[in-house]
Image (spheres, grey):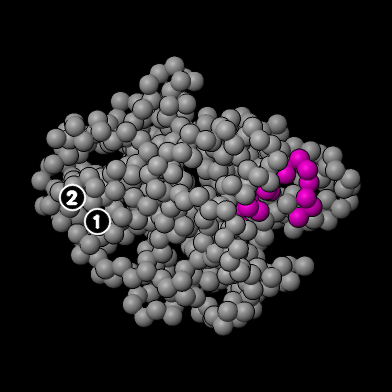
Amino acid sequence: MKYLYYPGCSLEGTSVEYNISTKVLLEALDVQLEEIDDWNCCGATAAESNSHLLSYVLPARNLALAEKMNDSKQILVPCSACYLNLKKTEVAIKKDKDLFGKINTVLAEEDLVLKGDIIVRHLLDVLSNDIDIETIKETSQNRLSGLTVAPYYGCQCLRPFSVFDDPEDPHSMDELIQATGANLFEWDMGGQCCGASNTTTKPEAGMALVGRILKAAHGADAILTVCPMCQMNLESSQKKISHKEGIDLDIPVLFLPQFLGLAMGKIPKDVGLDLNLSNTGPLMKKAI
Amino acid sequence: MDKIGNEQLLDEIGPVKEMLQTCIQCGTCTASCPNNEFMDITPRHMWRLLLTDHAEALFSSKSFIMCSSCYYCTLRCPRGLELTSAMSLLKQAASRLKLKKFKRSSLFYDAFLDSVQKHGRVREMEFITHYFVSLKNPVIPFGYASLGLKLLAKGKIRPEFGSGSSGKLTGLFKKVAELEA
């Protein structure tokens, strides 16, 4: 199996461990990744808050660059915000000819042409649909069977496009977690919002949303995420929120491929566990 | 309120009103919004103000910048209205009109896009430094200092101060501005 790879900006900076662990896991699963040459930022939520056309042009440039590569017609994206921006462009150009035309007028500045034959896939989509789950089962040998983990999906890999999971009641991580031998933490917060950039621009509102999720996860051994923004929000304010709420809400937060990698026998450093902001020490102790 | 009247505001948001013509005021959007308790007027109320041409009242509230793009309202709207996109279009209008009330959010997005235009990718440290400087408030950054130090210690961000490189995506940004003018 081979996919084009779009890491996105966060995976080069604040979520570098998501990049490391995605590559390590997919290699172990015999999946090849070919990074898109000269990819650019997808625009995050900044472009759509500023200019309608720019919010399509930035992802479109990446799709056009991907089309020039002959390795695959599918792009694998680990970051949910990047995934949504690339996906929304893939979908929009099929419906809106006027927008499609304008995008190509802008891309002509860089002698690029967008044809529109690329399919954008989220990492979780590929893991839960394309990968043979038996490989994870066989390699895991119940290494992490003593752990109970809470799958957290966030918003933008689920909504507005329902591609690979139920956007109201997501379960695509269940089978992957159970394949490792670990237990599922039962909760209904998996698809709730982490507050996104409100944690920076409107902290009072953002922190309230993070607090709800951390409180609901109380009792689990870890939260698993598939988005750099969710990961940052859930990890970075645990002390502040614990202090405010008067209970200890400290909990390890791992990217899904970090957890799957560990289950399959990778050592913590291989999956970038030293780079997490939350304290992953208790998790590793309990797992051993 | 800035010195921008109801008429000019209506002009700016005409396309949003067009999008929402079939709203039945059921309030599913409000009930689904994770940020509604931090809004002074609810999403349903916003759409009502918009449809009845009360643009000044709409922009005197900060509700739409509270939207964190979770897409629950879009998913659940019984009329299939793209309400999250409507929120974004209102953010775009506030940014275009340079409304003072929304300055902090606009500066955040501007700083982000500035970094993207320059380098093609966002450099997180440069962007957040630029944002804090543009706020012209020396107190706000302290709230984020401990996180910043943690990220520096992990080698996840690097101190960068205006690398002065020529804009990698300036051609694209210019063409977009030209087509949107």
Dominant SS type (magenta): helix
Q: Identify the magenta region.
A: B96-113
Q: Which mark is residue A25?
A: 1
Say left or right for A37 vs A130.
right
The answer to whether residue B79 shows anywhere in this view is: no
| Residue found 86% across the figure and 53% down from its top | B8
Q: Where's residue A141, x and y in %?
A: 10, 46
The label on residue A266 is 2
**Mark 1 on the same chain as mark 2:** yes
Which chain letter matches label 1? A
C-beta proximity under 8 Å, tags 1 and 2 = yes
Residue extending farthest bottom: A111
The answer to which quarter of the image holds residue B45 is: top right
Q: In the rendered structure, which amino acid carries the disc numbered 1?
A: Leu
Drawn side of residue A198 relative to residue A10, left or right: right
- Chain bearing mark 2: A
